[in-house]
Image (cartoon, rainbow, N blue to C red):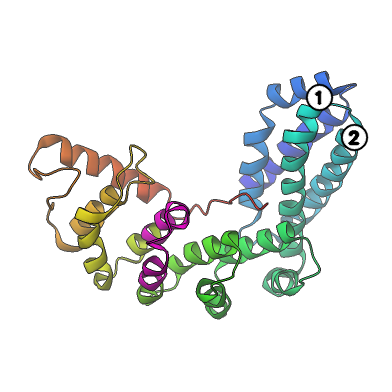
Amino acid sequence: MEAQRRLCGFSAALERLLAAGDAAAFEAEWIAQDVQRVGWEALALARRANTEVLEPVLAEVDRRLLAVLERCRAFVDSHVVTFRVPELERWQHAAAAALVGARWGVAGLRTVIADTGAPLGRRYFAFLALAERHPPGAWGLFLKYLRRPDAHHAFVAAAVEAARYYPGRTADLVNAFDRIRGDQLRRRFLGPKILESLLVLGDTAALPLFEELLVAGHTDPDLDRCEVTRALVAVRRLTGRVASSSKFPDPDAPEVRRTLDEAERRFEAERDWLKPVTVI
C-alpha cells in the first residue's frame, strides 16, 4: 500500500532527526532526507478514505512528531525555531487528524471539526480530510463555511475544493467568486480554487463567468493562478471552441492550442489533489 510505504519512510526520517546531536546536524539531516517533501506527501495520502489499516503507523508518526518537536524546542537556534518548529507543528496536527480519521472515520473527523477548543490547525486538517473523503451527507457543513463571511480562509478554501465532488453546486461557487472578486488578496488566494472546482464540475451554468473572465480575468505566468487560461480551458471544454481572450487575441495562433493543451493536462492531473494551506 503506497500510503503505508510513504508513512513508514516519513517515520524513519523523523527517527533520524531525533538522533541529531545539535541544530546543525538536525538541519543537515532535514535537507538530506528531503523531509519537507516526504512529510507532506505521506500525510496527504493518509488523509484519504479507507485508511483504517494505517492506524499503527500513523500513531507511530504522531508520537515521533511530538518527540521531534520537543527535541527542536530544546535547540537554541533561530532557524530551527522559526522555520522547522512551525512545520513540525503543522505535520503533527495533520497526523493527529489523519489518525482520528483512521480510527473513527467521518464521525471522528466531524467531532474534531466541531470542537472549538481543539487547536485550529487540527480542526483544519480534519476538515480537509473530510473534504478528501467527501461523504454524501457532508455538503451542508462545507456550505456553512462557504457562506460564512467570517469563516477562516483555510476552511473556506477546503470547502471550495470539496464542492467539486458535489454535482449541482455551481451556483454556490459562482456566488463565492462574486463575493471575493473585489478583494484582491482573497481573489488571488481563493479564485484559482473556485475556478478549478467549477472546471471539474463541468456545468454549463458556469459558462457566463468563464466567458467574462476571458476579457476581465487576471493573467499570470503561473497556469494555476491565471484566470484567463483556466477560462479558456473551460470554454473550450464546454463549447468545443477556442475563444479570443485578453491573453491571446488570436485564438487560431498555434501557441494558443499548445498552451491550452498543456494547461488542460496539468489541471486534469491535479483535479483530485486537494492542497493544504498554511494555517496561522
Residue ID at (12%, 50%): 244
- Amino acid at the residue labelled 1: Phe
- Amino acid at the residue labelled 2: Arg
Q: Residues within 10 Å of mark 1 (few under 14, many from 20)?
A: many
- Residue 259: horizontal and vertical position, in percent? 23, 39
In this view, 181 is above or below 167: above
Checking the image for residue 71, the label placed there is 2
The residue segment tinted magenta is: 173-195
| Residues at circles 2 and 1 in contact by the CB criterion of under 8 Å | yes
Q: Total marks drawn?
A: 2
Left or right side of 149 for 74: right
Residue ID at (43%, 49%): 270
Marked residue nearer the N-terminal end (2 or 1): 1
**In this figure, which residue is indicated by the disc labeled 1?**
26
Left or right side of 280 for 164: left
- Residue 121: horizontal and vertical position, in percent? 71, 57
Residue ID at (85%, 42%): 64
Q: Is residue 12 visible?
A: no
Residue ID at (20%, 43%): 247
